[in-house]
Each structure stands twice: as structure tokens, then as C-alpha cells.
Amino acid sequence: MADSRVNVPAECRRGEPFEVRISIRHAMETGYRTDAVGSTIPRDVIQRFTCRYNGEPVFTVRMTQGIAANPYLRFFVTARESGTLDFEWIDDGGIRGTAQAPVKVV
Amino acid sequence: MCDVAQGSALKTALLVLVLVSSSARAQQRVLPLDTLRPGIEFAGADVRAMQSDDLANPGFLWVDRGEKLWRDNTTGQSCASCHGDAPKSMRGVAARYPAYDTAAGAVLDLEARINDCRVRRQKLAPWQRESDDLLGLTAYVTYQSRGMPLAASIAGPARATFERGREFYSTRHGQMNVSCAQCHDQQWGKRLYTETISQGHGNAFPAYKLEWQALGSLQRRIRACMFGIRAEMPPPGAPELTDVELFLAWRGQGLPLEAPGVRR
């Protein structure tokens, strides 16, 4: 399941940083928990998260099991030209998630 | 003549007194309506900040899922095909729940009502309690009543459910032998370990509970409380849980729906 919620400002001023916020639906199973019969529940966390601005990576996170479930990320990107932010993440199971947000620079 | 007239006047007065007092007892509230405080007021600043931010509030991940499910027609007719636009058709619905459903012949909470629609009208298999799909759709429908006051009815056929719920609430349970009323009517505002005891309302459910790292239903929260007092947990969907849900909705009448809620 690759649900997410993204927020970027409606308009950004050229050369100035703008705030990007994204919350991702992921259980972020730590690998430390055990189930009802005592077996360890295998680790399954988002390994890598990348934000590309018109194709160029501008923000990358390498996550481990220290990040809580349903991670909420807030970071800044400097506005250049209008275009698209592409978000991509991949977890321990190899499952990819994606999201997009338009960037309008004035 | 005077004695007879006075006698029947006295009888009438007594009858009125009995009727008034019995209905007053039925409506008697341990927590008067003007003393009600929602759980968010007992939560810390970080939890309040998370709930009030629609991006940071993880509950919205389930609301968004519910919005997709509302329009999903891959397995048959979608909710939208009958109910149209949810912000219009579902406005105020969650605030009336749990409610007596004539077709089902029972009081249903919102989760049960959604499943009833799935089975009876969409001819689909019901969703499991606490599944992401059922939680998502419940959260989405509840979101349409965001900010509206709790207004469940205990009239008519719902009355028996309400009475059972009130009974359950006031009964001691479990190894710790305590009732809901002892903590949430009598001890609210006081500390229990690191937490402040709330009044135990359900107006913020389904809620994202940080302890669960997921969204969960009011029934899940009630079951967790039973676990906490070392009582046998009724299974999900058990009738006594709906009884309590209806009682809580009456008890918290007027509290605004926090949808989706965030709790520790």
C-alpha cells in the first residue's frame, strides 16, 4: 500500500526555499517485536526516500527502524524553475511507493 | 366531597412525581453536559499539535484510503453510485451513531452499518473489524461530520441497548475489579502513572493512537481498557461493545467530533 499525503505551497518565489511536507503510510516494523507465539516479526521499514525536483535529486533519507510508523517528513527545497517534485521510496520488501507534487515558481 | 377531590388531587400529584422522577433517573447524568471535556484537553501539547495539522495527522492516511474506497467500483457498485458525493450525503451521519437500524433490527455502530451495506446491498463479503479498509471507510465517513456535536438517539428500540451499556459501564470488571465509572466519572483529571485520566469519551474515534502506531476504532480502545484492568476482552464486534458505544455517545452528547483524532 503506497498511500501518502503531500503538501507544497501553491506558489514559490524563485531562489527562496519552500517547505515540503509528506506523510507516508507504512507500518515500519522494527524487527524487534514478537508475535503471539514468540516468533520475531521480521523487519520491514522504508530503506530509502528520495525527492527529485524536475528529475534532479534534492533530498534523500536513509531510514532505519528508528523511524516511527507512518513517517512524516518536513524539509525545504530552493525554488528554481516550475515543474514537478517526484517522491519515491522503497522498503525492505522491495515495494516501491511514489507520489508527486507540482511546483509553481513565480 | 372535599376529601375525595383532595384524595384524587394527591394521587395525581403522586403519579406525576413518580413519572417525573423515573424519567429524571433515566436521564440523570453523572457528568452534567456543561462539565464535559473531550479527551484532547487531557492530551499533551505535541498530541494536540499533531491532531490539528491535517498533514501531520496520520489519521488522514486512512481518511484518504476511505475516499478511494468510496469511489471504488472494481468489485461491484461503489458507495458513490448510491450515495453520491460523501461530503453532501454523509454530512451529520457519524454524529448520529451508534443508531438503531430498522433493516438489521439492532443498534449498529458505524463500522457495523458499513458492513451491513456491503453485505445487504452491495452483495459483498463484510470487512474484518480493524482492517485497514473498514477503518479507512469509517474514518472517511466520520470525517464528513468533523466538528459536529455527538447526537446519538437512545429513544425507542435503542433504549434497551443504552440501558445495557450503562449497566456495563457501572459494573466492576476483571482482576482489578473496577468499573469504567470509577475512573472516568469519579477520578478523571487525576494521574494514572504518567497519564491524566480523561473522562473517557468516544468523540475522537476512529483515532490514530501513537501506542498502536495505527488508526483504530472505539471498540478497539474499549477492549484495550478491559485488557488494562485485567478483564476478559469481549471479541471485536461483540454486542456488549456496541452497548457501551451507545452509552458513551449519550454520555458525551454535544461533544464535537474530532475526525480523525490523535491520541497517545
Image (cartoon, rainbow, N blue to C red):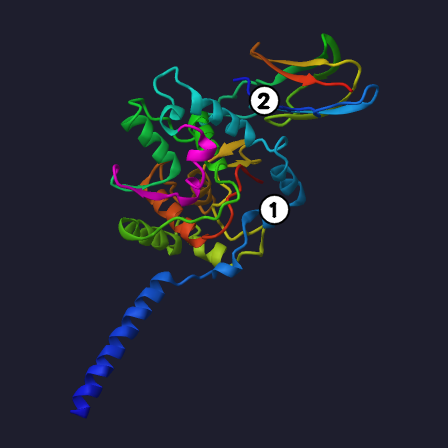
Q: Residue at x 60, y 18 (%)?
A: A45
Q: In which quadrant will I find the N terminus of chain B? A: bottom left
* Disc sitting over residue B159 in the figure: none
* Residue B121 image position (x, y, % from top left): 29, 26
Instruction: From the image, tell me which residue sits under label 1.
Output: B43
Q: With respect to residue B230, does A79 lie above or below? A: above
In which image quadrant can residue B217 be found?
top left
Q: Residue at x 39, y 56 (%)?
A: B170
In which image quadrant can residue A15 be found?
top right
Residue at mark 2: chain: A
Specify start and end residues of the magenta stretch as a single range: B84-104
* Residue B160 image position (x, y, % from top left): 28, 51
Q: What amino acid is at disc 2?
A: Ser
Q: Residue at x 45, y 27 (%)?
A: A36
* Residue A87 image position (x, y, % from top left): 66, 15
**How many neighbours does mark 1 have within 10 angstroms: few (below 14), some (14-19), or many (20 or more)?**
some
Left or right relative to B19: residue A35: right
Can residue B178 be seen here? The reply is no
Q: With respect to residue A72, does B36 lie above or below? A: below
* Disc sitting over residue A4 in the figure: 2
* Residue B225 image position (x, y, % from top left): 46, 44
Label 2, secondary structure: give it: strand
- State the count of labels: 2
Left or right relative to B161: residue B35: right
Q: What amino acid is at disc 1?
A: Ala
